[in-house]
Structure formats: structure tokens, C-alpha cells
Image (cartoon, rainbow, N blue to C red):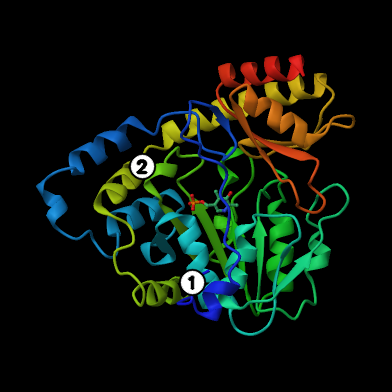
Amino acid sequence: MSRFWTDKIASLDPYVPGEQPQDKKYIKLNTNESPYAPSSKALAAMAAEVSERLRLYPDPNGSALKNALAKSYQLEANQVFIGNGSDEVLALAFMGYFAGGKPLAFADVTYSFYKVYAGLYGIEPKLISLNDNFDIVPADYQNLDVSGVVVTNPNAPTGKALSLADIEFILKANSDVVVLVDEAYVDFGAQSASTLINQYPNLLVVQTLSKSRALAGIRVGYALGHPELIEGLERLKNSFNSYPVDRIALAGATAAVEDEAYLKEICDKTIATREQSVKDLEALGFNVLPSATNFVFVTHPEKDAEKIYLALKDQGILVRYFGNKPRIGNYLRITIGTNEEMAALTAALKTL
Ligand SMILES: *Cc1c(COP(=O)(O)O)cnc(C)c1O
């Protein structure tokens, strides 16, 4: 607390990211990073960009990356917005589309950054409870009287996915506000709503290169939507920072998006490891929610999640524990690592 802080700064309740401890080498299963290297084509493109060209500003429009994304999702470049991680894209979307006075609807158990943005922009959250099985119930997203709706599909930290028909139901029930579908994990087993963009002018799909494309370190995310929604985001971005994505990141992201074969290869590997891990965890007595993501959300009927978390950390394995959070205090979110890392996890859990 400083006497120079405004009431605004003092009022904030910032997001707390998963631990990134620097004291020793952990098996990191706590922040949903990929255990695999990025596309070698992306690495080569980034290495090539480390050159005298770095004296120049990057393309403020990121056209090469937008074109690659547009091609990949069969859209036009003016239906694509890019930002410094999808967190930045979300921040701009919240500021632009949801700070209109009415509350913003999202699930009670979901990505905890939404509440932080809501606090930043003075948006009142309208929390819609997941059912007892931790499912989003589309029927609960009708007659809301809100500024907008955020749906995470698949949801985090539960890992559960909605069908495209469910997403369409929510879009139709909220046709006069923006429905933002955060698809950070969609490549691991859910259907993207990007195919609905030409039908629903209120749909904004947000994705990231941090998870499935193994590029959390370069901070690139994007939104797909109607050209007018995208133009709104561009207006905001150009009123804040014209160059949020640097030259190296643009080069790497473009090559990564073009390398669809590698995306599929590492997603398939993660899915196969996930299926094995589900069996191994169930054999140890854990309840494992069905996952369409690169993590599993688990609880043990007889064991305390905090104790497991601490004991694993002691053994050099980090998982995500949600401590004080309502409903999920006895759950752990475990990122799917390599087969070897998951075998080490299972072996450590056996000793507990
Ligand atoms: C990881 C994550 C993000 C943020 O991704 P970045 O592109 O790394 O900022 C956004 N939404 C959800 C649900 C996530 O899990």
C-alpha cells in the first residue's frame, strides 16, 4: 500500500498465476503448459527473426499471422484479432464489450481471471452455477439481462466440454449481447465454435498458442468473430498499444499456425497420455472428471487434496491446488505431461 495509490489500485484483486518456482527443477503439472517443444518450424522462424530487423517495429496489424489464422479456420483476415496472449485479448474484450453497466454472466467455477477483469473494469459478475456434476447447463443461460456471456469450452479447471449445439443454444438465447467462447483447450478434444462465426454476429471465439501449440513463452492469443466485433477490438488495441505482439512472436506464431501436422501430433500424444493417466488415477481411487483438455480435475474420496499437493511438491512434482475456492477446495488440477512425467506422478501417488 502506497500513499500514491489511487482508490482504483487499492481496490484491485489481481490474478495469482500458478507457481513458477525457480529454486529447483520440478515436474511441472500445474499451469497447463505443453510438455513438448514448439514446432521446429516455429523455432527456426523465431531464430531467423533475431536479426538486424529487430531495430524496426513489428507489423502493427500482424497481417502474416492473421492470414495464417484465417486460412486455418476458413475465415477472412478481418475476422481475426491478435494479442499478447489470450489474456490480453480477453482484457480488451471485457473492456470493450462487457463494461456497459449490466452484469456479465459466467460460470461460478471457471477461469479465475474473468473475475479479475470484471473487478478491473467495474463489471458485476453474474455467476451461473455449474450443476452438481460440474456441467455448464445451457438452459441456465436464458433471460439473463446481462452485458454479455463468457463460456469456457472446454471449461477450466473442470475439463468438461459442451457440444456445439449447446453453444448455439447459448448464442441464440443471448443474440443481443456478445457471447465470448474461451477455447484455450479446444484442440485437446472439443469442437470449436469458429465454424459458427459466419452465422452468429454476436460470437467471439478466443484461443491461444500457449497450450496446444506449446508456445506459452511467446504470449500470443487471438479472437475470431464478425468483422465489426474484430474492428471494435482493433480500435481498443490502437488506443492502448499499437504493437502488442513483437516481431519474434509474430514470426514464431505464424509458423506454428501453419504447422498443422505438428499441432495434431502433439495433441494426439497428449490425448493418449491423458487416457492412460485417467486409468492410472482411477486405479488409485481418484474420481476423475471426463476431460477434453490437457489436464484432469480430480478428487479423492478419502484423501485431503492439500496434503496430496504438499506431499507431491515435496517430491518435486507440482500440481494445482485451489485451496480456499468454494466447491473445488478438495480438488487438484493435474496437467498432462509426458508419459514419463505421468508415470513419475503415479509412482509418487502410490507412496502416499
Ligand atoms: C491459459 C488460459 C488462458 C490464457 O492464455 P494465454 O494466451 O497464455 O494468455 C485463457 N483462458 C483460459 C481458460 C486458459 O486456461
Residue 314 visible to the viewer = yes
Depicted 152 relative to depicted 199: above or below? above
- Determine which of the numbered discs, if any, sits on residue 292 in the image: none
Residue 262 % position (x, y): 42, 31
- 89 left or right of 125 in image: left
Q: Upstream in the sequence, badge 1 or badge 2?
A: 1
**Residue at horizontal 46 percent and vertical 62 percent from the top:** 88
Badge 1: few (under 14), some or many (20 or more) residues near its Cα, within 10 Å?
Answer: few
Estimate the x, y position of residue 322 in percent, counting from the top left. 71, 46
Badge 2 element: helix
Q: Amino acid at mark 1?
A: Ser
Left or right: residue 195 compared with residue 46: right
As drawn, which residue projects farthest toward the front? 3
- Tell me if I can see residue 274 in this picture: no
Q: Position of residue 218 (x, y in %)?
A: 37, 46
Q: Residue at x 56, y 76 (%)?
A: 121
Image mark for residue 2: 1
Residue furthest to the bottom in view is: 101
Numbered circle sitting on residue 258:
2
Q: Quadrant of the C terminus?
A: top right
| Amino acid, disc 2 | Glu
Mark 2, residues whose alpha carbon is within 10 Å: few (<14), some, or many (≥20)? many
- As measured in the structure, the alpha-carbon distance from the residue carrying label 1 to the one carrying label 2 is 47 Å
The kind of secondary structure element at disc 1 is loop
The residue located at (81%, 56%) in the rendering is 130
Which residue occupies the foreground of this view, 324 or 271? 324
Q: Taking 308 as reference, is 218 left or right?
A: left
Distance from mark 2 CB to nearest ligand 1 atom below 8 Å: no
* Near-viewer residue (176 or 347): 347
